[in-house]
Image: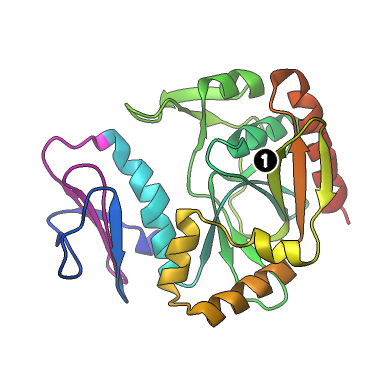
Amino acid sequence: MMERETHVSFGQVPHSLFDDLLGEMSWQLSDDRFLLRGEGDHYFLYCRGEGITVERGENIDVSEESLWLNGRVYSAIASMNGLMPIHASAVAFDDKVFAFTAPAGGGKSTLVAALANHGLPMFCDDTLLLDPSDSDRILCLPGHKRLKLRPDAVGLTCAVPREKVSKTVDKFYAEPAAGDVGVALPLGELVFLETGPQPVIAPIAGAERFVRMQDDHYTAHLFAEARKFDRAGLFTHLARMATQIPMARFVRPVDAASFEEGVELVANRVKSRGLT
């Protein structure tokens, strides 16, 4: 379904779905259409059942196009078709997915790249799609994005760098040492990355699990608007997710000297939980 719905063509699109014109770096969503405007006159229109049409105005940065397509546009399409995008990178082990979430720049991609050196293949980078339709388990769809790393992260993880992501983004596409996984798998655990003096992993339980599901990332906003949640509906959805998703926090100092110690701690946890 996602492959069909994300088919891209080029042409002119409406510059608004409603009465007001769409400003730069903003979006609009109706029942079956999503319109995003990037920088300048760079528009992305998704129509359910018809795919994506991209309008390239004058003086746009084409190198940014894949970032918009693989980010907000992809998350909107997933949300409009019943899937839940979350801001996370993940690895796979023993037919389960172990995902890591943090604000932008929080080290999600770097950790996934480093875990590849422990034999854990990448499942996704930056956006994880969840299928919440099964009441017994949360299924994860394999990632659609290539791994992106800052120059210092490339050196820290020994990943193989490829081309620069774009003219304005100081990151490189990279190949994880253990490859990647391309099949849907159940979610084993969602780990929140935090900073602290010593590397430690601790489970998250009780009401904190519900609080942790209230993300302020654009993926959460897109999903809530696409599903037309009122306050009660959103509460019910988040409560269900908090009940079904095992959660933990990974606290570690953000410095190169203790980086590998933290990575080894996470790798050992993933492998021990994967086999249970």
From this view, report whether residue 50 is shown above or below residue 25.
below
Q: Is residue 82 left or right of residue 184?
A: left
Q: To which quarter of the image does residue 20 belong? A: bottom left
Percent x, y for residue 84? 53, 65
> Depth check: 45 or 93 in front?
45
Q: In the rendered image, is residue 163 in sight?
A: yes
In the image, is residue 52 part of the stretch drawn in magenta?
A: yes
Chain part drawn in magenta: 34-62
Answer whether residue 177 is magenta in the image: no
Residue where numbered disc 1 is placed: 121
| Residue 23 locus on image (x, y percent) | 21, 53
Quadrant including the N terminus: bottom left
**Residue 170 x, y percent position in the rendering:** 42, 25
**In the rendered image, which quarter is residue 77 located in?**
bottom left
Disc 1 is placed on an element classified as loop
* 259 w.r.t. 126: above or below: above
Residue at 59% across, 62% down: 214
Question: Relative to the observer, which residue lies in front, 127 or 211?
Answer: 211
Res. 5 image quadrant: bottom left
- Front residue of 177 and 269: 269
Amino acid on which the number 1 mark rests in the picture? Pro
Residue at (84, 48) in percent of width and height: 202
> Which residue corresponds to the image point at 66% horizontal and 35% vertical from the top-left?
111
